[in-house]
Amino acid sequence: MDKRARISFAPLQGELARKMGLSHHAEAENGTMVLLREADETVFTMSDGLIELSRALGGGWRILSLARFIPKGLRDGVYRWIARHRFRFMGGKNACMLPDPEWLKRLRN
């Protein structure tokens, strides 16, 4: 989805997240997503992270940024519900797919 390859990934349990003080956001059950905008080091979590990610992706994804007009409590509640049920939505797999070599270039630990 990131055709411009501007977004990098790092596990919240990894060394980079620990050094940056982001590892405390990791939730084993809720599939937490944290987005760090490097330009100003602003941290976005849960639904705010998805909204910022949609803005960073640009193109048609920006339509998701309209979700910012939905009250945060409601957005985060939906986010947590989807996160709790993510395995069911993805076919119940407990293993991750092997990343594409292009993804590996953007994976930081």
Image (spheres, helix red, strand yellow):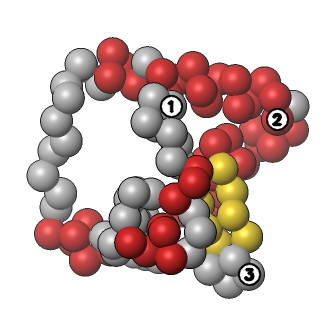
Q: Which mark is residue 72?
A: 2
Q: Quadrant of residue 92?
A: top left
Kindly identify which residue carries mark 1: 30
Q: Residue at x 24, y 19 (%)?
A: 91
The CA distance from mark 1 to mark 2 is: 17 Å
Which amino acid, by three-letter code, is at mark 1?
Asn
The answer to whether the residue labelled 3 contacts the one labelled 2, judged by CB atoms less than 8 Å apart, is no
Give SS at disc 1: loop
What x and y, as percent, mark residue 55?
A: 66, 60
Sequence-wise first label, 3 or 1: 1
The CA distance from mark 3 to mark 1 is: 27 Å
> Which one is in front, 47 or 27?
27
What x and y, as percent, mark residue 72?
A: 82, 35
Mark 3 surroundings: few (<14), some (14-19) or many (≥20) residues within 10 A? few
**Image quarter of the N terminus:** bottom left
Give SS at disc 3: loop
Kindly identify which residue carries mark 3: 40
Which amino acid, by three-letter code, is at mark 3?
Asp
The CA distance from mark 3 to mark 2 is: 22 Å
Q: Residue at x 52, y 59 (%)?
A: 23
Give the answer, above or below, for where 27 lies relative to 93. Answer: below
What x and y, as percent, mark residue 87?
A: 32, 23
Give SS at disc 2: helix
Which amino acid, by three-letter code, is at mark 2?
Lys
Sequence-wise first label, 1 or 2: 1
Mark 3 or mark 1, which is nearer to you? 1
Give the answer, above or below, for where 104 lies relative to 88. Answer: below
> Which one is in front, 28 or 91?
28
Mark 1 or mark 2, which is nearer to you? 1
Left-right relation of 21 to 39: left
Name of the residue lying farthest toward the bottom:
39
Left-right relation of 19 to 43: left
